[in-house]
Amino acid sequence: MAIARQTFTSTPWVSATVVRAIDGSTFDIALHDIKDPDIPPSILSRWRSQELSDAPALRVRLIGVKAPSLYAHDGALFESGVQSLNFISDLLYNKKIELQFDTNIWDSDEVILAYARIPGSSQSVQSMLLRSGMVYAEREKDYSLREEFIALEEEARREGRGVWAHVPSRLTASSVYPL
C-alpha cells in the first residue's frame, strides 16, 4: 500500500547532537550552534542556563509518536519498551540530527516537542520509528503529520514489524500501549 507523504513545513531546522536516549521517543540533545537565529528563544535561554554544567543537555520528545513503556507497575521491564529504546539509541546516539518545532515548543513537563530528521534524509525520525514498528502513532492530539503517522503504524502492524511482531492483528495501539 502506498502512503502519501506530506512534506515538512517551511520552518527552519535546528542542528543538534543526541547525547542520550531516554525511551523510544524521547532523547537528550546538545545544541551545535547557539548563534543559530532559528533556535527558538525559550530553548536558547534554557540551554544557556545550563550549558556550563558537566553534561549540558535538553530533553526532546518526538511529536506524533509514543514509545512503549519501559517499566511495568511492579518495576519489571517490558520487552517492547527495551526494544524501542535500543532501536532509537542505535539510530541516533551520538549522531547529528535536525529538529523542527511546531506551534507548541514545550509540553506540560517542560520537554521540547519536535520533529526530527537525520541530515540529508527526506523522512522524519518519527517515520523511521513507525515504519519499523518501534512506536505508536499519537492519536489523541492534532499535529501536521498525523494521518501519515497513523498510516505508517497501521502498515507496520499489518506486516508484524517491531512491537507488532507478537500481537494478534485485532489489537490496536491503545490496547497494547500501557498507559
Image (cartoon, grey):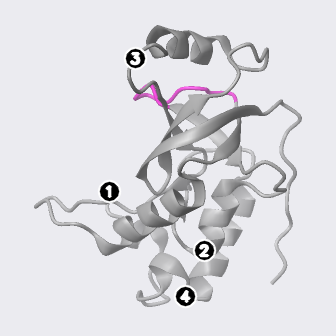
Whether residue 68 sits left or right of residue 4 in the image: it is left
Name the mark on residue 69. none
State how far apart marks 2 and 3 are (Cα): 36 Å
Residue assigned mark 3? 53
Q: Magenta span: helix, strand or loop, mainly? A: loop
State how far apart marks 4 and 1 are (Cα): 22 Å
Camera-near label (2 vs 3) is: 3
**Does residue 120 belong to the magenta stretch?**
no
Q: Residues within 10 Å of mark 3 (few under 14, many from 20)?
A: few
Q: Earlier in the sequence, mark 4 or mark 1?
A: 4
Q: Earlier in the sequence, mark 1 or mark 2?
A: 2
| Amino acid found under the numbered disc labelled 1 | Leu
Q: Residues within 10 Å of mark 1 (few under 14, many from 20)?
A: few
Camera-near label (2 vs 4) is: 2
Whether residue 176 sits left or right of residue 17 in the image: it is left
- Residue in front for this viewpoint, 174 or 16: 16
Q: Secondary structure at mark 3?
A: loop
Name the mark on residue 160. 4
Q: Quadrant of the C terminus?
A: bottom left
Q: Quadrant of the N terminus?
A: bottom right
Magenta residues, start to end = 103-111
- Residue in front for this viewpoint, 69 or 14: 14
Q: Is residue 74 above or below residue 62?
A: below
Which residue is located at x 24 percent, y 60 percent? Answer: 71
| Amino acid found under the numbered disc labelled 3 | Ser
| Amino acid found under the numbered disc labelled 4 | Gly
Residue assigned mark 2? 132
Name the mark on residue 179. 1
